[in-house]
């Protein structure tokens, strides 16, 4: 050792500070409008956000009612927007879309309406789009291994087995 050993001194116990209940800063409506500035949100997401800001239930309901009256919040419009974004940037199957929308607080009936508006073969086209990039990496693989990879890749993205089979049939016949 280079120097004398240090001895730890017992520290005095300090009383824990009791924080007063947090009071929300500003108006719930204004906080919700700021939250909506980045992207659309569902009513449930806004409720969650305002609760995290410590607003009481009555204030939250009043703010959400104002947002609905001004058409800032609409779960059906949000679901349509979400599906469109997924189709454009990150293709997913119906199963994954249903799960994502449910997690965001969109009701089953609204999800059924929005997904029912899609074209019947939309899932197959989305699956083919989702496969376009990884398929180039798998070109040199044996057929059995490539099929296994395609199946696992699409299943992980929420495509159902009929869609996966259809895509694999098309991929095999295209080659």
Image (cartoon, rainbow, N blue to C red):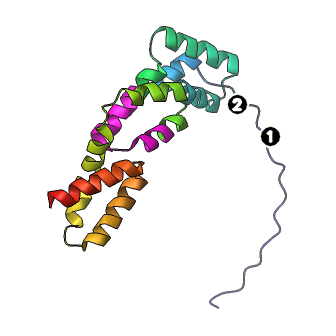
Rounded to the nearest angstrom, the CA distance separating label 2 from label 1 is 11 Å
| Picture residue at 36% right of the left edge, 54% below the top | 154
* Front residue (pair 113, 81): 113
Q: Residue 146 location in percent, x, y?
A: 28, 67
Which SS does the magenta portion mostly show? helix
On whether residue 81 falls in the magenta region, the answer is: yes
* Front residue (pair 37, 87): 87
Residue that mark 1 sits on: 18
Q: Is residue 151 left or right of residue 70?
A: left
| Picture residue at 75% right of the left edge, 31% below the top | 21
Residue 76: quadrant of the picture: top left
Residue 103: quadrant of the picture: top right
Q: Quadrant of the N terminus?
A: bottom right
Assess whether mark 1 and mark 2 are in contact (beta carbons under 8 angstroms).
Answer: no
Q: Which residues are magenta?
A: 80-99
**Residue 38 in view here:** no
On whether residue 78 falls in the magenta region, the answer is: no
Q: Residue 12 location in percent, x, y?
A: 84, 60
Q: Quadrant of the C terminus?
A: bottom left
| Picture residue at 46% right of the left edge, 9% below the top | 70
Residue that mark 2 sits on: 22
Is residue 65 positioned above or below 159 on the image?
A: above
- Residue furthest to the left in view is 175
Q: Residue 31 location in percent, x, y?
A: 53, 23
Q: Residue 161 location in percent, x, y?
A: 40, 52
């Amino acid at each position: 050792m280079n120097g004398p050993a240090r001895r730890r001194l017992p520290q005095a116990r300090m009383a824990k500070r009791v924080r007063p209940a947090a009071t929300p800063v500003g108006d719930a409506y204004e906080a919700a409008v700021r939250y909506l500035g980045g992207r659309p949100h569902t009513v449930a997401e806004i409720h969650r956000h305002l609760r995290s800001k410590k607003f009481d239930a009555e204030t939250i309901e009043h703010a959400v009612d104002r947002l609905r009256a001004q058409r800032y919040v609409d779960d059906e419009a949000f679901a349509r927007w979400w599906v469109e974004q997924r189709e454009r940037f990150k293709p997913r199957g119906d199963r994954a879309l249903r799960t994502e929308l449910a997690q965001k607080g969109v009701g089953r009936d609204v999800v059924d309406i929005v997904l029912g508006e899609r074209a019947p073969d939309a899932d197959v086209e989305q699956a083919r789009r989702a496969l376009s990039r990884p398929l180039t990496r798998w070109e040199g693989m044996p057929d059995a291994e490539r099929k296994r990879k395609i199946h696992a890749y699409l299943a992980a993205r929420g495509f159902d087995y009929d869609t996966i089979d259809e895509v694999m049939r098309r991929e095999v016949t295209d080659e």
